[in-house]
Image (tube, helix red, strand yellow):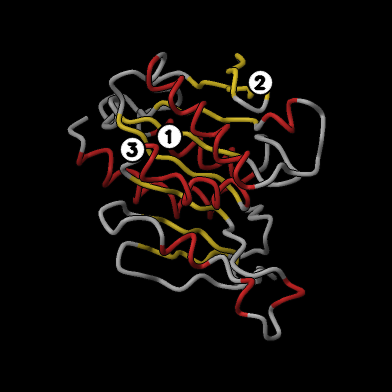
Amino acid sequence: MFDVQTPHGPARVRLEPDGTGAVPGETVGRRLALVLGHGAGGGIGSPDLRATSEAALALGLRVALVEQPYRVAGRRSPAPARQLDTAWLAVIEALAAGPLAGFRLVIGGRSSGARVACRTAERAGAIGVVCLAFPLLPPAARRGDPSKSRLPELEAVPPSIPVLVVQGQSDPFGTVPAGENRSVVPIPGTHTLSSAKAVRGAVSPWLAVLAAAVGG
């Protein structure tokens, strides 16, 4: 664990080693790294983030789990979107200049962290985005206020950057539609995505395609 100074206070990064849990001969993603952010009120230890990290590590990717400054400071209420994005990009820049120098980056996160990743994908230089439990529409707004939809954040990811959305079949935030650059994998569960096996099964093949594309 180490801290990264951002314009909104220190963020914290847990960097997982290259190849941990990988099967010999299958570490195809040695020049690819996955950077993940947490949900609004949670941390980097959520079941879906752990499962996604395990899937990436088994393919030989490096993994960085990022705590936003508000969580490092002990607050549960998230900072405004602009602050989240600015802090996230500061961490991405520090990682790209330091421990992940020379690595291609896939970025993502769960819920709020997925929104941050989508909003910043192009500026971060990402080659892919992983969205776990993307909160498409707040439950209170699902009965008829399309202006509350977060779909524009997903649509803002350039078509050249593939997006994977892993969504619980009973997620009260709704179901994300597939798109030109967007694969949507429904799995059993709600917004918590508590089935590690299902998450790994959704994430692994998608990451493996990206890992193979960067040439291992």
Query: Which one is in front in this view, the residue at disc 3 or the one at disc 1?
Result: 3
* Mark sitting earlier along the chain (2/3): 2
Relative to 114, does residue 83 appear above or below in the rendering? above
Give 71 or 130, whichever is nearer the viewer. Answer: 71
Query: The residue under label 2 is which amino acid type?
Result: Pro
Task: Bin the neighbour count of mark 3 within 10 Å (Cα to Cα): few under 14, some 14-19, many 20 and up.
Answer: some
Left or right of 199? Residue 127 is left
Read off the residue under disc 1. 34
Q: Position of residue 32 (x, y in %)?
A: 32, 30
Residue 169's x, y, as percent? Answer: 59, 70
Residue on which disc 2 sits: 10
SS type, badge 1:
strand
**Toward which corner of the image does residue 30 lie, by quadrant?**
top left
Q: What residue lies at 41% left-to-right and 13% top-to-bottom? A: 98
* Label 3 close to label 1 by CB (< 8 Å): no
| Quadrant housing the C terminus | top left
Residue at 70 percent of width and 68 percent of height: 138
Q: Residue at x 38, y 30 (%)?
A: 33
**Horizontal side of residue 171 vs 30, given as left or right:** right
Task: Find the distance from the CA under tag 2 to the CA under tag 1.
Answer: 20 Å
Percent of width and height locating residue 189: 65, 63
Helix or strand or loop: what does disc 3 sit on?
loop
The Cα–Cα distance between marks 2 and 3, rounded to whole angstroms, is 22 Å
| Disc with the residue nearer the chain's start (3 vs 1) | 1
Q: Amino acid at mark 1?
A: Leu
Quadrant in the rendering for residue 175: bottom right
Q: Is disc 2 surrounded by few (<14), some (14 to 19) or many (20+) residues within 10 Å?
A: many
Rendered view: 197 above or below 173: above
Name the residue type under label 3: Gly
Q: Left or right of 91: which side holds 26?
A: left
User: Mark 3 sits on what residue?
Assistant: 125
Q: Is residue 204 left or right of residue 172?
A: left
